[in-house]
Amino acid sequence: MRRSLILDVTVRAVFDSAVVLSLYLLVSGHNRPGGGFVGGLVAGAAIGLRYVAGGRDAVDSTLRVRPWTILSVGLLLVTLTAAAPLLAGDAVLAQPFVEADLPVFGPVAATGALPFDTGVYLVVVAMVATVLDAVDPDPGAAPDPNPDQGPRPDPDPGSVAERRGAAS
Amino acid sequence: MLLALLAAHALLGGAILLAARRLGRWGFAVGALAPAALLVWLATVAGRVLDGRPARSRLAWIPSLGLHADTSVDGFSLLFAGLVAGIGLLVFAYAWHYLDASPDAGRLAGLLTLFAGAMATVVVADGVLLLFVGWELTSITSYLLIGGDGRRAEAREAARHALLVTAAGGLALLGGLVILGSEAGTYRLNELLAAPPSGPAVSVALVLVLAGAATKSAQVPFHRWLPGAMVAPTPVSAYLHSATMVKAGVYLVARLAPAFAGHGAFRPLVVGLGLTTMLLGGWRALAPTDLKQLLAHSTVSQLGFLVLLFGIGHPATTAAAVALLVVHALAKAALFLVVGIVDHGAGTRDLAVLPPLVGPRWAWVRGFGAVAAASMAAVPPLAGFVAKDAAYAALVHGSAGDRLVLAGVVAGSALTVAYALRIAVGLHRPAAVATVAPAPAGEPAPRREPAGGAHPHPPSIGFLAPVAPLVGLSLVLGLAPSWWSRVSGPSGEALDPAAHPHLVLWPGVGAPLALSLLTLALGAGVFGALVADRRRRLARAVEATAAGAARRDPFGAATAGLLALARRVAATVQPGSLPVGVGLALVTVSVAATAALVGGPWWPGGVAVVGATANLPVAALLVVAGLAATLVRRRYVAAVLLGVTGYAMALLFLVHGAPDLALTQFGVETLSVVVFLVVLRFLPDRFESRPPLAARSVRLAIAGLVGAFVLAFSLSTAGLRPDRAVSRAMVERAEPEGHGANVVNVILVDIRGFDTLGEVTVLVAAAVGVAALARSGLRPRRRP
């Protein structure tokens, strides 16, 4: 698909911030607004923007792993966190609580909720990636030989109609 | 210990299934360990059990629900479990030879081991729910065993028929058991039977339980699956479909009858069912020339007899029924094994094409078959005669109703004699019996061409050996009835303390002996009429019944009707048009939920119309964007406007102090717009030309209906706050117990963590579904 240079650059700039924001939401979610689900949504939206700007290749080069892998890891993390307390003789989903004094961050408290929430985050991100993967309109497209070299020059700048999806 | 043995069946069966290919028929050698161990254990407890002290055990299953795996081995359970394990052992030894060339042997061995464990569970369970679990497991293993490797349509159809009938009966049984349990206040069989509950609910429960028993034990009108199940290999038929599984229903009736026979319609229902089944099965057994079909119908008939005798529920009939149960298990298992040997050696079991079986080994086969058939037909001095004599005596000395039943039983027994003669004579001179036309359409057609040619190869000694104990026991029990009484006594007394068996070889001159002789004479007469009549009047009458049954086929009609109904419903609800589908879903939700709202407090007083002033601009934005979305002509613009309404909702949440909700709404909305944009590339830029006025007004009406419903729903749910909101406790406990200041997150990951776990799983399933749906039409593609 054709690319818009301006949109592409903007999205690349926004993308990193959005991912950092999503991670912040994930980590701080237990005590401030946020959480794994919201964080996953923000990261998913960021990936969606990359898709709108650069198509499947952009998403693939960003994620570097298949959506299925992320999906499986997320589900595994959630399930294992839920089941882990059984080994200690506790009930399913019983959550351990640890407090530690880290060098830079100062006193930090963490619960078993964090890995659980991370699993939720991963599943949501993977869900978005899967949907984008599935609706890709160009299944026969040749893979980008150099996925990490940034946007290709637009060979046909006059084709506005092709860029409609990105523009609106 | 007993539970460990049952678990060993399951583990061993599973292991054999895993290694089925490698083990082949060695699976039977491995699997036989399980019933052998069970048999040894039964022998160790036999002494105390026969003294009247049941061996009980309990394992906590789900203690928080008060659910335990209770087992209790009393005299009757001991007898039944002994049959299951003992005949199981013989069948395993037999199958080793029968399936010597079958690639499917390993799988069958594993399944048979699983089945043996499930069946033993049924008969030793004291907790009714454990009984139910075993019951359903036997249905499932039976399904897999009948279906074979799934390559033959005929086998699949028979397996499906058997599974649907027995599983539907199983559901009825579960319902009945639960009602019985809650009425009695206990789910333990021995407590339930010691103090049987009564009342209208119990009557319903009994009918449900009987429905379960009738489907499992192939009683009219559910009997049709059993002849179909004969497509399974002969060891399976011998074990499941004659000696053990089909007796699960008989077991249940036997357990319940002493306590419940007088309750409501129990006795007339059971006796009516049993008698009809006995007569119909016996009549149908006169027609087939396929020996297995013949045996299947005869099993149906005998099961009817057993259900009838146990169902009467009097001590004397119960004691006689226990004896008959043993007789039938021994005789029928032996007959099935004999037919299997014939089939294996001659390549056919159809009397019409079966060559004469000549040779010393074949003489043994014929002899075994004749003795087993004679025992079934109650010829003295075999076990069958002793048991049937006890049954006649019990009925003769019973009430007036019993004597009415007696007439039917004599008729049914005469038919038994007739078809037993068909088997015994058929094994010696096939051509003499094969004057009757073959099995009707709709039932498995027998193999026509004998694969073994005109000279069937005789069985090996090992192949023949498992039949010998069955036949020998039929003879020994008949010759030593006093010993049999001693062993059989505690079995009957476990059901009914007054059920002492009266088993004798010489009953003395009297009504029972006269009836026995009359039965034999009548049966011989029927057989003579069948064979000697050149114009085949009797034979044609039997065939007419069979043909009529094949024509009616209620099971086929019911399944076909159900499928047709499903197709019609699907075609109506999902006609393939998106507007119609969505419209139907919306109208259904609105109408159904509105119906639930009617009568509720749908306009609570405390709802403010405007609320905070900050609401007003947000509401205006919502309304404008919503209206605009319906009016614009370009799809992209509509999608973005929909997104604007979502963002406005997020603002509204923010105004009301719910940042978490607002954040989530914001994220969801952004994603929705992105997905819309991606998907809309497949559609034209603009909406299609305006639909005709009629269609538009229908859509407007649906939209209005949904809008009105959502409004009413929001208002009424806002008024339905309980006095003390659940959220308060969550807020209070979030920080100290969940270690989180964000209550919403603590709820998601801790308080309602199970819900989140489920939702994540749903999300994964949805992702898989989306991917599968989108790719279903695409060719495989390369990945970078």
Image (cartoon, coloured by chain):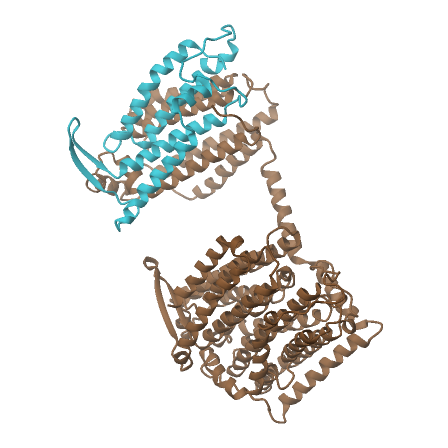
Residue at the image point whose x is 38% and y is 33% from the top: A123
Which corner quadrant of the image does residue A117 belong to? top left
Name of the residue lying farthest toward the top: A158
**Image spot of residue B778 (x, y percent):** 56, 28
Place residue B378 in its image quadrant: bottom right
How far from the left and from the top, in percent, is residue B90?
54, 70
Q: Which shade is chain B?
A: brown
Closer-to-camera residue (B603/B344): B344
Total number of numbered discs in the rendering: 0
* Residue name at image x 28 percent, y 27 percent: A25
Q: Tell which of A16 and B735 is nearer to you.
A: A16
The chain letter corresponding to cyan is A
Q: Position of residue B71 (x, y in %)?
A: 40, 68
Residue B756 lies, with reference to residue B780, above or below; the image says: below
Viewer-proximal residue among B700 and B53 = B53
Residue B723 is left or right of residue B158, and the answer is left
Query: Considering only vertical position in the picture, is B571 above or below B269?
Result: above
The answer to whether residue B456 is left or right of residue B165 is: right
Q: Can residue B135 be seen in this view?
A: no
